[in-house]
Image (cartoon, rainbow, N blue to C red):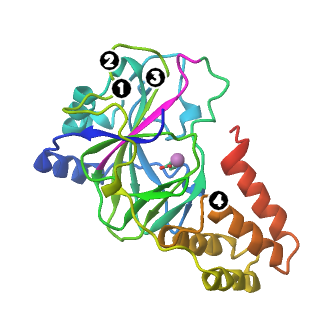
Amino acid sequence: MRTHYVGDTCLDDARLAKDLATSDSIAWSEAYSDYVFGGAWKSCMLWARGGSAGDGVVTHYDHDRPAAFSEFADQLPYLRELISTVADLDRLNFVRLAKVQNSVIIPHRDLLELGDLADETRNAHRMHIPLATNEDCFFNEGDTVFRMRKGEVWFLDASEIHSVAVLSSQERVHLMFDFVDVPSAKPLISVEGASPDAGIPADRTVKRPPLTEADHAHLMRLADVLTLETVNEIFSIVIKKHFRCDGGEGFVWNTMIDIARAAEDPAVLPHVKELRRHYTLERSA
Ligand code: YCP
Ligand code: CO
């Protein structure tokens, strides 16, 4: 299934605000922060295989046991109710609250890490519901940059290369659902007026001007300061450019490889190539 807008939930702002305030005192995991430049990717497991909140790394959970609410969910009654109301709990593997601010996420694929598990327990479908977001939060898949609005339900094809920019010091908080791939008469998430596959609606997409030759030349000058120590900062700059100008689908990785090739230290190019392999191709950890 391709990435698409599914429908809207009716969020209760007062009850949501109360749970989000409570969630501040929970011990958030910083697992997967290696995907992020600028800050951390903080997550809080609300529903998981085995029912324990765990450390946030999906491979560390007991996939032989059924999924259930975690001890964190017990402190967040509104989110617990929302999850039970909208999601098909029979096929639900994990639900996380995910928090990002002032950061970009490297273009990557997900859901490949559990490849060895039986199909009935493997994460196969991902959905998001933004709970706190703003105009400066962007999602990218392929050559499309778009915004998901608060309360909307989105199906994301996480096996496609995607990236994120939260260019705001306000926290972006999403509920992230992972489901198994088992057929059912019920939808994965049921909301009023859901459309089966409307793709990414035009009014959610962000129109970016084409990247110019001059833009490209400016980015290439980063080669002069690209070392193994500055590679994360250079990544941030190139990813931010991707959200502002349209340089084509493979822009971030292609540009990083071009800049790395022009850098003085010969160790930089193999490092960037290894990162590309890790995040986009053969990941197995
Ligand atoms: C995402 N993918 O695309 C997540 C962030 C790593 C895995 C953390 O939002
Ligand atoms: Co991802």
The front one of 121 and 45 is 121
Which residue, given by chain and number where applicable, does mark 3 sit on? 50
Find out whether the residues at labels 1 and 3 contact each other: C-beta distance under 8 Å: no
Instruction: Please report whichever mark, 4 or 1, sits nearer to the chain's N-terminal start.
Output: 1
Secondary structure at badge 3 equals loop
Kindly indicate the quadrant of the structure image that contains residue 15: top left
Q: Helix, strand or loop at disc 4?
A: loop
Q: Are marks 4 and 1 in contact (CB under 8 Å)?
A: no
Residue 152 pos. (x, y %): 27, 45
Tell me whether circle 1 and circle 2 mark residues in contact (CB < 8 Å).
Answer: yes
Task: State the CA–CA distance, disc 4 to disc 3.
Answer: 38 Å
Residue of label 1: 188
| Numbered tag placed on residue 186 in the rendering | 2
Q: At numbered mark 1, what does the secondary structure look like: helix, strand or loop?
A: loop
Whether residue 108 sits left or right of residue 171 in the image: it is right
Question: How far apart are labels 3 and 2 at the CA level?
Answer: 23 Å
In this orientation, does residue 135 appear?
Answer: yes
Q: Quadrant of residue 222?
A: bottom right
105 versus 236 height, above or below = above
**Do the residues under discs 4 and 2 have CB atoms within 8 angstroms?**
no
Residue carrying label 4 = 250
